[in-house]
Image (cartoon, rainbow, N blue to C red):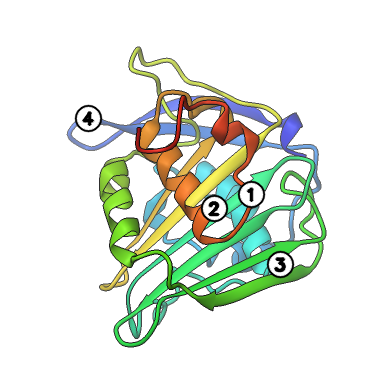
Amino acid sequence: MVAALVLALVQVTSPSGASVGVCASATSAESAPSAREMSLNLAYFSKSLWPCEHNRQFYGDWYGKHLRAMEEPSFAAVDAARGYSRRYRLLVLPTFTPAYAIRIDVPLHGPVRATVVTETGAGGYDPGNKVPLWSYEIREHHPGEMDDMVRGARIENRTNGAEPETPSGQIVVCGDGTRYVFEELDADGTQHLVSRHQCDLDGDRPMIDLFYHMHRIGRLTVPYELMSVIAGPPGG
């Protein structure tokens, strides 16, 4: 259960002494997964995505178990980028309602496709079973729009710690609510990931615009928490 999350925060530094993120030793009220289940869940993410093993095991297992329940492909698989120029996915994890994923696949040849899937469980608890929603060719949105938004959000330059730091160096730790997990897979197989809780989105307009755009492409209602932290339409 995410609401019972306990974090022990440690500043992580590189060999040169530069800060590379915040490490969290996380525990929850849910029973620990078996070694096999955790291995299957962690296989969704490259080991380099988190600054320490505690974060990888907690967040990787949490995100991975929902993607696995939805039968989503792993962007960390050796052949995940084969045949694609890029792939994007937004995993949305509300604490008490079903999680869902919006995936955009841009092939080297052929039409761009969007795939949307949800589950019978809840984002902060057990995922339950897969519920396919729809998959279709994207005609009304140009792939370049997505590329521009990803570049604008500077995904590759964001630190993916347990929780983001504020400019003052404070750590924002959020409880119940919705967590957004965005993945990008480059043509060379490099996986990028940024996760944000709704409580630390305020003022981060590039990420808000990106999450908003993914919902529009996925033909889903934009969540209230995204609309409530912006004044006017995205991009304004």
Query: Hey, what amino acid is under mark 1?
Result: Thr
Bin the neighbour count of mark 1 within 10 Å (Cα to Cα): few under 14, some 14-19, many 20 and up.
few
Residue at the image point whose x is 48% and y is 27% from the top: 230
Q: Could you tell which of marks 2 and 4 lies nearer the N-terminus?
A: 4
Query: Hey, what amino acid is under mark 3?
Result: Ala
From the image, tell me which residue sits under label 4: 18
Query: Hey, what amino acid is under mark 2?
Result: His
Bin the neighbour count of mark 3 within 10 Å (Cα to Cα): few under 14, some 14-19, many 20 and up.
some
> CB atoms at circles 2 and 1 under 8 Å apart?
yes
Query: Hey, what amino acid is under mark 4?
Result: Ala
Please tell me which residue lies in front, 25 or 192: 192
Q: CA distance from mark 1 to mark 3?
A: 22 Å
Q: Could you tell which of marks 2 and 3 lies nearer the N-terminus?
A: 3
Q: Could you tell which of marks 1 and 4 lies nearer the N-terminus?
A: 4
From the image, tell me which residue sits under label 2: 215
From the image, tell me which residue sits under label 1: 221
Residue at the image point whose x is 65% and y is 68% from the top: 68
Tell me the mark number nearer the camera, choosing from 1 and 4. Answer: 1
Q: Is residue 152 visible?
A: yes
User: In which quadrant of the rendered image does the N terminus lie?
Assistant: top right
| Rendering coords of residue 118 (x, y %) | 71, 62
Secondary element at image label 1:
loop
Q: Quadrant of residue 75?
A: bottom left
From the image, tell me which residue sits under label 3: 69
